[in-house]
């Protein structure tokens, strides 16, 4: 049973923010060993609450428990373990060499916490997209205010409970609610905002941040193209694309949004994909309400949005290769594969964010590249090909937040890789060291070590012939 949400008033939000500001200054002096201790205890705490987390996410959109383990709990634990292991290294001041003109100085970069940070999260991975950024935020020594998505209320409530049980209130606080609560929070002069969600709301967040000149990380979405060329191992490509697309019911920011397949292998690929989708998500050769491994659309609004996209594409000539069965009562949409989808249809213009995969064929690399470049820069680009020449051509000719070659969606949990979009798909990077950097101010500290400063030689007055010669030399050589 979900308990009733307690929504904070404007005054409570302001009061909490002020207490975080005080705490964040104290945290600047906190030893790194204490940060690591907190992260270690938090890791144990999450593991000991595995069942509560599984149930909450399952109650929100019937996400299979093992999928919760793998795609909600594990990414947070992996972030925690990585941060604990690397934090001494990440926080150590970085020695910087002095250029010749700075002879006699010593410099370093120190990583100071930004201060009070706001984390606004979406509903599609409601646990990991709240707490993953929190790990980076705490590893960098900040306090955090979190606003989970209102569309997954069971998980939002549980996160609020877990945070209350584990953290001091002026270190991490959760405010539940929707747009109104977000808007109220966005008025405050946070030191950093980490937003995950749609490009449309990303623009709202960035505008609000501009009022306070707050730095932002925007983890957004978009249409991630997936290329299958004629040299691809079709069965492997189909299996990986089926997994990446229909995991979480297609509600994944980096899910393949559409497939561009070389026309010579299109039929073979469509058949292989149908087979793999059934193998992964079906039972007794069918995928239905009883399927154990398949989640649901999050709510009626998104169910209707997807139904609208499907209707629009069918009315403009799309052919159903797989799927067609939906249940409005339970937000169930059978995995759907479409071909003949019109380039001008909404399906090929909007981010799909559901279990529908349009497949379009192409004949030349140039034609395929032109289709990709006609759309805003995607969060992910997948290419299945064993021709390194055409792969390299594609990578050089296109832009994307992340790329996988002969793989799909697994780049997200790679601890040593930065994750993020570019322009319409995002600004800034997250995960591991890159997440730590995002929540840190990289502060250069220069120290003059000698009484004689080489720069003094260039102070005014400027009539001296010697100074003029030095400047000449400088302009020419240094
Ligand atoms: P959304 O933008 O609608 O909502 C995200 C958050 O913003 C929620 O907490 C919501 O309450 C809040 N919000 C909504 N309207 C707001 C407003 N006007 N002002 C301030 N806050 C507001 O996104 P969503 O539907 O929850 O998530 C889906 C989107 O997120 C997709 O575009 C997906 O690609 C993207 N996404 C990106 C990543 C990533 O890591 N890059 C991960 C998951 C999802």
Image: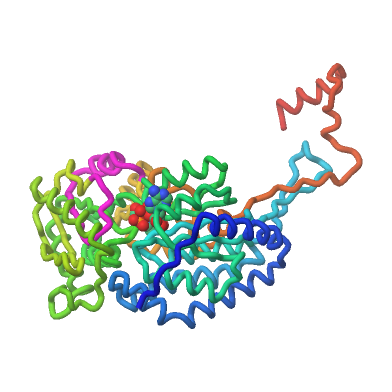
The image shows residue 215 at horizontal and vertical percentages of 55, 47
In the image, is residue 318 above or below residue 81?
A: above
Q: Quadrant of the C terminus?
A: top right
Report the image quarter containing ligand 1: bottom left
Residue 119 visible? The answer is: yes
Above or below, comparing residue 316 to residue 74 in the picture:
above
Q: Quadrant of the N terminus?
A: bottom left
In depth, the one of 52 and 129 nearer the eye is 52
Can you name the residue that lies furthest to the top here? 463
Magenta includes 432? no
Q: How is the image coloured?
A: rainbow
Tell me where the magenta segment starts and ends, as one range: 349-377
Residue sitting at x 10%, y 58%:
320
Q: Position of residue 251 (x, y in %)?
A: 30, 61
Q: What residue is drawn where x is 61% and y is 70%?
A: 168
Left-right relation of 447 to 180: right
In this rendering, is residue 40 above or below 341?
below
- Nearest to the observer: residue 384 or residue 223: 223
Q: Quadrant of residue 353?
A: bottom left
Q: Residue at x 67, y 61 (%)?
A: 23
Closest to the observer: 409 or 307?
307
Residue 16, given in percent of the width and then of the height, sits at: 58, 60
Image spot of residue 219 (x, y percent): 43, 53
Between 183 and 427, the residue placed more toward the observer is 183
Q: Residue at x 32, y 70 (%)?
A: 60
Residue 85 visible at all = no
Query: Could you tell me how many numbered marks the image carries?
Result: 0
Farthest-out residue, right: 451
């Amino acid at each position: 049973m979900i308990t009733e949400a307690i929504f904070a008033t404007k005054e409570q939000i302001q009061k909490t923010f002020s207490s975080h500001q005080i705490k964040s200054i104290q945290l600047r002096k906190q030893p790194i060993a204490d940060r690591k201790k907190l992260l270690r205890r938090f890791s144990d705490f999450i593991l000991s609450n595995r069942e509560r987390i599984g149930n909450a996410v399952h109650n929100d959109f019937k996400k299979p428990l093992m999928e919760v383990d793998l795609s909600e709990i594990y990414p947070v634990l992996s972030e925690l373990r990585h941060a604990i292991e690397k934090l001494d290294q990440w926080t150590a001041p970085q020695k910087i060499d002095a250029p010749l003109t700075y002879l006699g100085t010593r410099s370093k970069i120190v990583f100071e916490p930004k201060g009070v940070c706001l984390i606004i999260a979406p509903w599609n991975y409601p646990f990991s997209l709240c707490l993953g950024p929190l790990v980076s935020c705490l590893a960098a020594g900040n306090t955090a205010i979190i606003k989970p998505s209102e569309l997954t209320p069971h998980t939002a409530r549980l996160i609020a409970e877990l945070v209350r049980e584990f953290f001091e209130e002026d270190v991490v606080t959760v405010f539940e609610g929707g747009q109104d609560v977000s808007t109220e929070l966005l008025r405050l002069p946070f030191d950093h905002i980490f937003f995950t969600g749609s490009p449309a709301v990303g623009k709202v967040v960035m505008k609000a941040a501009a009022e306070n000149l707050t730095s932002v990380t925007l983890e957004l979405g978009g249409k991630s193209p997936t290329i299958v060329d004629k040299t691809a191992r079709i069965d492997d490509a189909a299996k990986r694309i089926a997994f990446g697309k229909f995991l979480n019911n297609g509600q994944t920011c980096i899910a393949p949004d559409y497939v561009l397949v070389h026309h010579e292998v299109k039929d073979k690929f469509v058949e292989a994909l149908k087979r793999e989708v059934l193998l992964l998500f079906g039972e007794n050769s069918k995928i239905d309400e009883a399927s154990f491994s398949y989640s649901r659309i999050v709510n009626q609004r998104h169910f209707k949005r997807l139904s609208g996209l499907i209707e629009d594409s069918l009315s403009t000539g799309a052919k159903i290769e797989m799927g067609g069965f939906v249940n409005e009562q339970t937000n169930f949409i059978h995995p759907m594969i479409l071909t003949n989808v019109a380039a001008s249809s909404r399906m090929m213009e909007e981010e799909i964010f559901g279990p529908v995969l349009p497949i379009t064929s192409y004949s030349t690399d140039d034609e395929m590249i032109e289709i990709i470049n006609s759309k805003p820069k995607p969060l992910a680009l997948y290419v299945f090909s064993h021709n390194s020449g055409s792969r390299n051509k594609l990578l050089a000719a296109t832009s994307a937040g992340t790329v996988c070659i002969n793989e799909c969606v697994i780049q997200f949990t790679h601890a040593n890789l930065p994750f993020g979009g570019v322009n319409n798909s995002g600004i800034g990077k997250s995960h591991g060291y890159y997440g730590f950097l995002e929540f840190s101010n990289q502060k250069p500290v220069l120290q003059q070590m000698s009484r004689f400063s080489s720069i003094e030689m260039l102070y005014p007055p400027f009539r001296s012939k010697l100074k003029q010669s030095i400047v000449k030399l400088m302009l020419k050589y240094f």
